[in-house]
Amino acid sequence: GAVVSQHPSWVICKSGTSVKIECRSLDFQATTMFWYRQFPKQSLMLMATSNEGSKATYEQGVEKDKFLINHASLTLSTLTVTSAHPEDSSFYICSASQASGTDTQYFGPGTRLTVL
Amino acid sequence: AQSVTQLGSHVSVSEGALVLLRCNYSSSVPPYLFWYVQYPNQGLQLLLKYTSAATLVKGINGFEAEFKKSETSFHLTKPSAHMSDAAEYFCAVKGVQGGKLIFGQGTELSVKP
């Protein structure tokens, strides 16, 4: 149980284009979903927290107009990187929990984004 | 504010040897603590978690961790390392009132044959 999927697993795009990454909880309803970014050989950096039906809460320094997050249902959240640039290249990981607060986060397999 | 420190960015052990990955936390009250494992180019997999029940927590793949309040530690151990244990390990802390999951810097475990 508690499986989270991400799609695509990797994507290459041209500078200036937008890329959408999907995060799905396959066998549970995720009240809260999280989006992280991870640079090589580094820890995870939380970008934003989203609750179903509400606007996402972004961490300090994360541009909300560049990283659009939608959590339209209890099983799906999307991250859209708008007007991507090479510096946006990274490994993006989502996680989901069944409730806010103390519940355990289950992580997706990650999406490798390369912007040319 | 809560924080997590993992001592040693890289640990190398021989196959069959004891694995010990260190994690110390800073929190005003005993928090929830987690260990995750990450294989190359993959997401994080939950190994085990402490949520104020038993202080010795057993997880998957033969790993266990002991919560020691007096030492503010939550070290991860495995009696006998296997080649497949080679990966990046993250310790994380979360407040009992909720809030963000705060990750340590990670420890890369290498297992030599």
Image (tube, coloured by chain):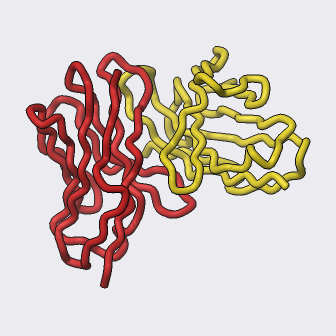
Number of marks in the rendered image: 0
Residue A113 image point, x, y percent: 73, 51
Chain corresponding to yellow in the figure:
A
Q: Quadrant of the C terminus of chain B?
A: bottom left
In this view of the protein, which residue sits in the foreground, B33 or B112? B112
Colour that chain B carries in the picture: red
In this rendering, the answer to whether B33 lies above or below B79 is above
Residue B73 image point, x, y percent: 18, 40
User: Residue drawn 18% across and 45% down?
Assistant: B57
In this view of the protein, which residue sits in the foreground, A110 or A114? A114
In this view of the protein, which residue sits in the foreground, A51 or B12? B12
Determine which quarter of the picture holds residue A25: top right
Determine which quarter of the picture holds residue B37: bottom left
Q: Residue at the bottom extreme?
A: B113
Residue B92 image point, x, y percent: 35, 39
User: Residue drawn 25% across and 78% down?
Assistant: B14
Residue A44 image point, x, y percent: 51, 42
Left or right of B28 in this view: A114: right
In this view of the protein, which residue sits in the foreground, B29 or A55? B29
Q: Quadrant of the N terminus of chain B?
A: top left
